[in-house]
Image (cartoon, helix red, strand yellow):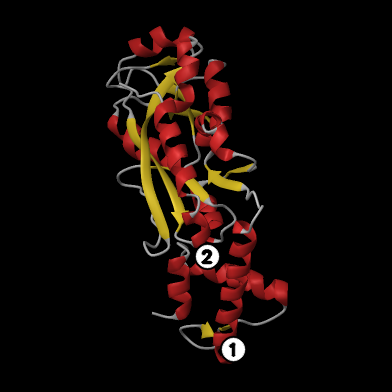
Amino acid sequence: ETDITLAARRRNLSQPAYSRRLQAIEAQQGVVLVDRSVRPARPTAALEANREEIQSTLAGLKRLRENIITGPGNTQDIAIATVQALASRLLPAALGKIRDDLGQRRVRLRAENHNQSFQMLMTEEVLLMLAYETRDRPVIGPSDLVEKTQVATDSLVAVCAPELTTGLMAISPGEERIPLIDYPRDNFLGIVLQDDVLAHTPHQFSHDITAGLTNAVMGFVRSGFGVAWLPHSLVAENVARKEMDILSSPLFPTADLNISMLQLKTKSTRKMQPLWAALAEAIQTTIAPYD
């Protein structure tokens, strides 16, 4: 395997995606890093000649960053990346339970999709990634670089406005199409919805509204546009307040979700272990189980 292929794999990127990133860096810096006149492409001779100096410089910059972060009197921001479905309700509630543990640290929360969150973790833009997974769709990182811990379970459940419940539950399969508020097909919840939910119900759906943000999906549900599948942790309070109903029927199947924490195995993140353990416990005590 070439250095470029190995580097792409370590960053959980496809080789074409990693090559595009290299091309962007080359254009920005005005240098050529990859010799594309040969197959397979490889680092230029100039880059190879300076390999040891580059590695030494990068290691020094990493040590300097860690010393600044963990130096005396530095409060260190708590930078977390996660999907919006976790960022909008569950994570703020859990952080509220460990406010004393946070001390004077500032929390910087980035709501991104899975791929963007993982890239931010790998480039140390964030200290922690909180992610949804399923059994067949785990977030996979290099085991020598990334530590992953499953902290809680959730469920993707069918919900609708209360005034629609009786009518939707009375529809027989094939009788009519049910209005669906769904996600883009490249969205993680959209993939789970298609493969783990809609593939297992005889109902037919009309895909009238597609929204990539779970908060927008919730708004369409409350406004009576149709049925949507949302994480139970996100809608539990709305259901308790009678703003939404869960469609509890085999015709509206649920999908199991896991909530996992990922962090890099570095000196600075090891120092955060007590805080991450407290956050994991807070998430476990915050999430409402779905039976």
Q: CA distance from mark 1 to mark 2?
A: 25 Å
Under circle 1, the secondary element is loop
Left or right: where 1 falls relative to 110: left
Taking the image as drawn, is residue 65 in sight?
Answer: yes
Which percent across, then down, holds residue 259?
40, 39
- Where is residue 285, by image quadrant? top left
The residue shown at (41%, 11%) is 165
| Three-letter amino acid code of the residue under disc 1 | Asn
Q: Report the residue marked by disc 1.
A: 50
Residue 17 is labelled as 2
The residue shown at (57%, 52%) is 126
**Residue density around tag 2, few if under 14, some if 14–19, many if 20 or more, within 10 Å:** few
Which percent across, then down, holds residue 27?
69, 73
Q: Nearer the viewer, mark 1 or mark 2?
A: 1
The residue shown at (46%, 45%) is 274
- N-terminal of the two: label 1 or label 2? 2
Under circle 2, the secondary element is helix
